[in-house]
Image (cartoon, rainbow, N blue to C red):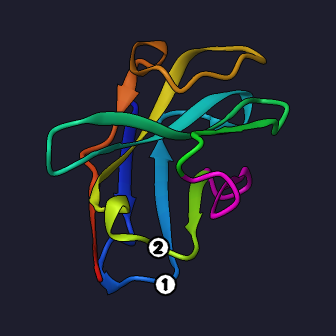
């Protein structure tokens, strides 16, 4: 049974870095597309970074240059390195996985079938 478990969220000051992890079980992340989403305090749900099976990446304009998505295929873990955090980065961060293998990239919620419970990131000014 597929399970995604996120960790690494914290309450931090603006300008610092955090790394989020998403451990997958019952699923091989190497062969598919995955994404990091966040739900903001205003209940806006937005895709921030995606990676496909070819390790190509896609970022939302709001995080490009500050966030880096990557994965360790041997450990079956997806990461999100977040640098220069801003208060507007506050939210519940969840990882998502596609059901089928492919080389596509998407920040759309409905492109993914499996989700973790999320880890909270709070950035204060």
Left or right, 95 with respect to 53, comes to: left
How dense is the environment of label 1, judged by Cα within 10 Å: few (below 14), some, or many (20 and up)? some
The answer to whether one can see residue 1 in this image is: no
The image shows residue 97, relative to residue 109, as above or below, that is: below
120 or 22, nearer to the observer: 120
Earlier residue among tags 2 and 1: 1
**Residue 89 belongs to the span the image colors magenta:** no
Left or right, 94 with respect to 23, comes to: left
**Residue drawn 29% across the image and 62% down it:** 90
**Residue drawn 77% across the image and 30% down it:** 53
Mark identifier at residue 15: 1
**Residue 68 belongs to the span the image colors magenta:** yes
Mark identifier at residue 33: none
**Residue drawn 49% across the image and 86% down it:** 16
Secondary structure type for disc 1:
loop
The stretch in magenta equals 63-76
Asked if labels 1 and 2 touch by Cβ distance under 8 angstroms, the answer is yes
14 or 38, nearer to the observer: 14
Mark identifier at residue 85: 2
How dense is the environment of label 2, judged by Cα within 10 Å: few (below 14), some, or many (20 and up)? many
The answer to whether one can see residue 13 in this image is: yes
Q: Distance between the residues labelled 2 and 1?
A: 5 Å
**Residue drawn 58% across the image and 52% down it:** 78
């Amino acid at each position: 049974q597929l399970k995604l478990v996120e960790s690494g969220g914290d309450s931090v000051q603006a300008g610092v870095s955090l790394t989020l992890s998403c451990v997958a079980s019952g699923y091989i992340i190497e062969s598919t597309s995955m994404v990091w989403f966040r739900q903001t305090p205003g209940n806006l749900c937005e895709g921030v970074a995606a990676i496909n099976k070819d390790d190509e990446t896609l970022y939302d304009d709001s995080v490009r240059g500050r966030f880096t998505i990557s994965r360790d295929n041997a450990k079956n873990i997806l990461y999100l390195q977040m640098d220069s955090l801003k208060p507007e980065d506050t939210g519940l961060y969840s990882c998502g996985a596609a059901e089928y293998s492919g080389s596509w990239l998407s920040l759309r919620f409905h492109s993914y079938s499996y989700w973790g419970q999320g880890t909270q990131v709070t950035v204060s000014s």
